[in-house]
Image (cartoon, rainbow, N blue to C red):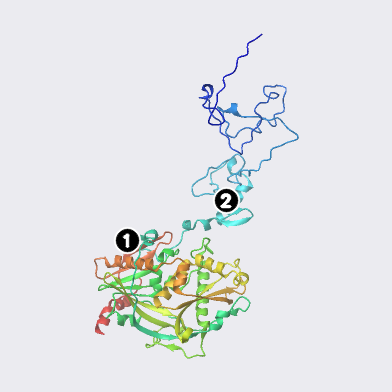
Amino acid sequence: MADFVLPKITDNPNGWGPCAVPEKFKDMPYQPFSKSDRLGKVSDWAVTGNPMYNDKKYNNKYASQFATTGAGQYAYYHEHDDQFQVVDTLKPSKPMFRGMARGRFMPMQRGRGRGVPAPTRPNNQSGNAWRGNNNNQANRGWQRGKFQRGGRNRNWQSNNRNQVSRKASVEVKLEWDEIDYYDFPRLTKLKLPDVNKPVELIQAGTLEYYDKKFDKVNTKSERKLTDINRRIPTVTTTLDPIIRKIAAKHGNVYATDVILATLMCCTRSVYSWDIVATKVKGKIFLDKREDSLSFDCLTVNETAHEPPSLDPNELKSLSEESTHVNYCFTQQVLRTDIEPHGFKEPNPFEDDDDDDEEENRYPLAPIGYKYRMWDLGNNISLVCRCEQDAISVGPDDKKQFLTIKALNEVEHRSDWHQKLDQQSGAIIATEMKNNSFKIGKWCLQAYLAGSDMIKLGFVSRVNPRDNKIHEILKVQTFQPSELASSINLNFDNCWGVLRAIIDAINRQPEEEGKYLLLKDPNKTTIRLYKIPMNTFSDEEDSDEDDTIPEENENN
């Protein structure tokens, strides 16, 4: 009878399982697996090595995804089972380019992603890689700027805003010298806190009272927007007669509220704009060019993720429509049956000699002008002409000065007529995001002028295809500080940006000179150029600008 030998038993006093790795398994490689792996049987004596089993349909059905040539011995196989099948819940992987033919893989390239069409075929290219209707359709989509994906058209350039080539607001000449440049990330870190309150120098013009009936307008009781024949002068800094008088006694930097607001929140801008800075005997005059549309017209959805259009002509048409809507709204909400509020000085542009007789036949719009001065430190005294649109009677019969602006609906898929009353907060937040630069300038204009309230109107087209007939759907009231916090506008940062630009001009060794601040059309950068004195003006205008300090000194 054979002897029975007891096997060696290893006892683990601390728990269950072996105490150490046996020597024969010490150097054996480990095959990893995850919970999603489809494991078969540990051992299959019926299939393994059986030449009579010819059904190869399920030979590799349960093979491990980590199995390679060297680790094939760890892969498991399962025979065909008519009663049970493992259900795969994972989503099938999709090819990177659907339009490509099967088996022709194009690797991912920088700047491309899902839904990007295949490149166009060169003239001298031939072969199977350029065959098929799918590829031709992709080529046509590339030329149109759109690509068919998922049953709808997508504008490929809309998600690549920086790749859209825009034109500068002014053509840069070869003789212009670039002195300095400022990138937006650096400007957003600047701060100038604790700026003192302004000093009121002169108040001029008249203001009409705001009609409070428009505060009750909603989508069910809308008001038609009407055209009002009034003139709103857009006079630049050096042509303002009151600024010429002030320059003899006060300040050394002069500008209008539109120009200052553009500089102070320039980090939000996308389109190109330019400002001319003239330095005469240590004094700086910030002006806009005579034919500049950056300050006379309003932009539409400038900071939106998907711009309304890439066609310059279409953008110009939308800008003109928005400017007209804003002008008509600011005049329609005023009351003409009450005597307007007049300031000490008359409107400085009543006696403005204009060669256009047809334009002069319309009366001037009632606008209040406040000439205020700020001390920015470093021997900088800033004088600004600020504008206000209306006056209202608040609680305790206290007069409140108002700044009135209007937003118009551009993309009618938002459907203000249906959602503005119930979802006003979401629509206002979307408009603040899509028009961050424009609303930021309005907020700064109200802040510089010392307005108590901002009246923001929402105007939409009656017919989406007709850009001439509009209606007022809602009027929202904001405080300047409240609106600034809603769009993340920091006044200390705005003052810091303005102070940095003025310091850069003051650092120039020349006592007299002319400079151009230009927002790069395709980059988040502002460039400072030194230009000749006769740029953007004829000899008469140049001589007139040069005699500004002498004329003021005689006064």
Q: Position of residue 432 (x, y in %)?
A: 50, 67
Name the quarter where the N terminus is drawn.
top right
> Label 2: few (<14), some or many (≥20) within 10 Å?
some
Mark 1 residue element: strand
Q: Position of residue 267 (x, y in %)?
A: 41, 63
* Vertical arrangement, residue 261 with respect to residue 175, above or below: below
Q: Which comes before the other along the chain, label 2 or label 1? A: 2
Of the numbered discs in the image, which one, if any, rests on residue 115?
A: 2
In the image: residue 44, left or right of residue 174? right
Q: Residue at x 30, y 82 (%)?
A: 245
How many numbered discs? 2
431 and 536: which one is in front?
A: 431
* Vertical arrangement, residue 363 with respect to residue 30, above or below: below
351 and 341: which one is in front?
A: 341
Mark 1 highlights which residue?
Answer: 180
Q: Residue at x 52, y 56 (%)?
A: 159
Mark 2 residue element: loop
Q: CA distance from mark 2 to mark 1?
A: 40 Å
In the image: residue 369, left or right of residue 459? left
- Asked if the residue at tag 1 contacts the one at tag 2, i.e. Cβ–Cβ closer than 8 Å, the answer is no
Q: Position of residue 96 (x, y in %)?
A: 58, 45
Could you tell me the amino acid type at mark 1?
A: Asp
Of the numbered discs in the image, which one, if any, rests on residue 533?
A: none
Q: Position of residue 44 (x, y in %)?
A: 68, 26
Could you tell me the amino acid type at mark 2?
A: Gly
